């Protein structure tokens, strides 16, 4: 099975953007994971790290929870302004 990756070899296009948004809101990975847990999504800071580093594929459910926990529209995560795929 052929899998499309980002130009930098990561498994998602949103991880770096999520990291930038998280840092701009002065949230640690642990605090973001805690906010996601309060929304009923069972994750820990390792999940956040893997997403941000591009080690993990991201589902639409993940993106919805990220947008709710970061209090941003999902379109901000999905904007393709800096997305490059191979």
Image (cartoon, helix red, strand yellow):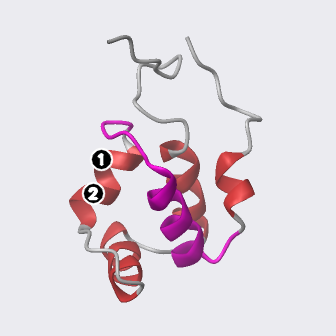
Q: Residue 3 appears in which quarter of the rendering?
A: top left
Q: Is residue 27 left or right of residue 29?
A: right
Residue drawn at (54%, 44%) of the image: 14
Residue 61 included in the magenta stretch of the image: yes
Rendered view: 66 above or below 2: below
Q: Is residue 4 left or right of residue 46?
A: right
- Quadrant of the rendering where the N terminus is positioned: top left
Residue drawn at (39%, 77%) of the image: 36
Q: Residue 34 appears in which quarter of the rendering?
A: bottom left
Tag 2 near tag 1, CB within 8 Å: yes
Label 2 neighbour load within 10 Å: few <14, some 14-19, many 20+: some
The percent position of residue 7, horizontal first and vertical second, equals: 53, 16
Number of the label disc, if any, that sits on residue 50:
1
The percent position of residue 74, horizontal first and vertical second, equals: 67, 61
Q: Is residue 4 left or right of residue 21?
A: left
The percent position of residue 72, horizontal first and vertical second, equals: 68, 71
Residue 17 included in the magenta stretch of the image: no
Rendered view: 1 above or below 30: above
Magenta-drawn segment: 54-72
Rendered view: 6 above or below 51: above
Residue drawn at (72%, 56%) of the image: 76
| SS at mark 2 in the image | helix
Number of the label disc, if any, that sits on residue 41:
none
Label 1 neighbour load within 10 Å: few <14, some 14-19, many 20+: some
Pick the front one: 15 or 5:
5
Residue marked by disc 2: 47
């Amino acid at each position: 099975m052929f899998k499309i990756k980002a130009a930098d070899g990561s498994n998602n296009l949103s991880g770096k953007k999520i990291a930038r948004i998280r840092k701009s809101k002065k949230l640690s990975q642990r605090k973001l994971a805690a906010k996601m847990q309060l929304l009923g999504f069972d994750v820990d800071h390792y999940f956040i790290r893997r997403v941000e580093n591009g080690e993990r594929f991201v589902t639409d459910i993940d993106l919805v929870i990220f947008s709710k926990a970061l209090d941003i529209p999902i379109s901000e995560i999905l904007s393709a302004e800096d997305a490059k795929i191979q």
